Amino acid sequence: MMSNLDHVRNIAIVAHVDHGKTTMTDSLVARAGLISKELAGEQRVMDFDEQEQARGITIKAANISLGFNYEGGDYLINLIDTPGHVDFGGHVTRAMRAVDGIVLVVDSVEGIMPQTETVLRQALKEKAKPTIFINKIDRLINELQLDSNAMTARFTKIIIGLNKIIEQYAPEDKRDEWRIEVQKGNIAFGTAFHKWAVSIKSMKKYNIKFSDMYDMCKKGDHKQLVEKSPLDEVLLGMVIEHCPTPQVAQKYRIPVIWKGDMSTQEGKWMSDCDPNGKTIGVCVGVVNDEHAGEVGIVRLFSGKVRKGDMLFLASRLTKEKVQQCAIYMGADRVMIDNVIAGNIVGIVGLRDVYVGETVSEEQLSHPFEQIKHYAEPVVTKSIEAKDSKDLARLIMVLRAISKEDPTLKVEINQETGEHLISGMGELHLEIIEYKITKEKGVAIVTTPPIVVYREMISNAAGPVEGKSPNKHTKIKMFIEPVQKGVYDAMVEGKIPDGRPKGKALVEVLTEAGMERDMSKCVVDIYNKNILINDTRGVQYLNEIMELVIQGFEEAMQKGPLAKEKVVGVQIRIVDATIHEDPVHRGPAQIIPATKRPIYAGMLIAGVTLQEPKQKVTILVPQEYMGNVITLTQGRRGQMLDLQQEGEGTTIVVKMPVAEMFGFGNDLRSASQGRAIPYQEYAGYEPLPKDMLAKVVKSTRERKGDKPDPPTPADFLD
């Protein structure tokens, strides 16, 4: 099956939390003969993790390769079941790099929810073609008592909403082809729990009318519906007919995720998905196996992988030996001899591989684009080993977990020796703590969660002159906010961090609004901050530039106001006087001469804090609406939308993450447990001026600093 690429499909099942992805996947797993059809829908076989079973939600993306016979042909579907909870959205982003198509599951009662929109947008950015399954339609009939006209209106509303997103984010040349239409057959309706579905094709094939389905469902006769139009058959047909084969998909996907020259031999191999070309792939996941070590999950774009092959890792510029090849079957790894292009493979033996790594037979002229996560870690906890002898083990465990989950950020505070873990939300960190203590057996002590702020400037300052401690070297610079167009391009991932390589960056910066002459002088981009060498003919500057960059990066790591990370600052060096003797311009002289004027300039320009926000969608019965609005406003919530439909109300508010701790319990009290909240990341916004002094003081005290922030004079002696 694997070698006939016309019969291979790579798909992800995506949806908002609790819309029925894993339940639906059970029917496909049962169809492949891996579980009994009776248990499908209840077993949730892809939620094999202990925490997933206990909490009833998907926490990590799970891979499975399923073989099917459909209309006389044998097909292989490499399927990834992804989480729907916003805290685990990073798994969805990584899965999109591996697949060519998606099945988006939408709850017919809830409709298009925040995460529905987010996952569809992510799929379209990676050029994965959408198909839709509208789930739980039995609830419309039996719970909401809708007649067939009201049901049709509900479906139309969902389809129009999805097409709006597709028109906005799909590639221009694919918009019409990828539009969702009942007549095309790229949408199905049904109930995953009861294991039946209908699409335009199945209605014709099994001679079943919409009215028949409505009547049987109203009577609760699901058994007959399963016999007439089984979910697995309808889904399988939709995926095989509407999701592209690897050869078709790679022609338009490779130019998006690989920015090398498509006319080169390697570009042609990947575009054609050539199994006889050189091996090229990208790592989309890392799993830690206690016996095999790190297993890299790789989507192969050309060539093949066999046991004993030597593969090149782009980030480390080294070759590693493939010890085993495998395909994933949920919790199990099945060894196989070789895997060809167009498939997803588990490779044992790639030491220190990371998510987004380019894996190839020989060094590529250009590595793959980084996998860009759309949300950022906003909640931090301090974590320590309960017993000091476990410290080394804790560091190893944290390193392994942060490789598996790149959205988790781990830092060691060199001054205090504590470890800081930053995640997408409280649940994310709760799961990480569980893994460390229960799965890895390391007892830990954690602090209550804290919020990650950022420092940013509102105006420009300069020229500011910094002197080295020995007064022999002077550096003069301007400190300015990064232009809005350039900053937006950084947030979107068009401008990567790091030192400029080649002329490509100049074009991107110029397009984003920076003057061309200025964009040629960029020497470093770090954490959405830019360092520019705008000097002419300054002696010895090139010799100390490495240390200047180090000083710039250290200053951006900890700002002057509250020692939080700095974003959106542009440092322009305009002049320098440098001592001719290298002895007088070592790190101890140059780094302070760089950091001090940056800090002074930021304080003169007006440095402020930004706080992370979340968009919260709350579904609540009408009688509790007033209580919920009062609660959100008391927590600095900003009302974005309010919609009423029947007895239910949907409230959309933007709330600071700092006000979200304990919000779930208060919401339950305010609504007697009837309100359901859904969160999504909504970026950073300036902290209100009246709160700035208080937050700065508490943040500095927590970090062991003097409560009052420094003044520019402290850095300009």
Image: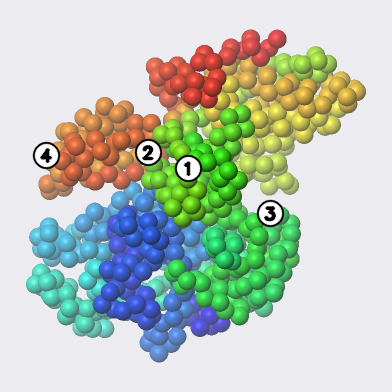
Q: Which three-letter amino acid code belongs to the residue tagged 3?
A: Ser
- Residue linked to disc 3: 315
2 or 3: tag closer to the N-terminus:
3
Residue 335: percent from left, percent from top: 56, 77
Q: Can residue 2 be seen from the camera position used here?
A: yes
Depth check, front residue: 255 or 330: 330
Report the residue at 25% width, 73% height from top. Answer: 195
- Residue linked to disc 2: 614
Depth check, front residue: 23 or 218: 23
Circle 3 — which element? loop
* Colouring scheme, one of rainbow, by chain, secondary structure, one colour: rainbow
In this view, the mark in front (1 or 3): 1
Task: Count neighbours of disc 4 (C-alpha within 10 A) and say few if under 14, some if 14 to 19, many if 20 or more.
Answer: few
Quote the CA–CA distance across marks 2 and 1: 29 Å
- Residue linked to disc 1: 444
Q: Which three-letter amino acid code belongs to the residue tagged 2?
A: Gln
Report the residue at 29% width, 36% height from top. Answer: 663
In this view, the mark in front (4 or 1): 1
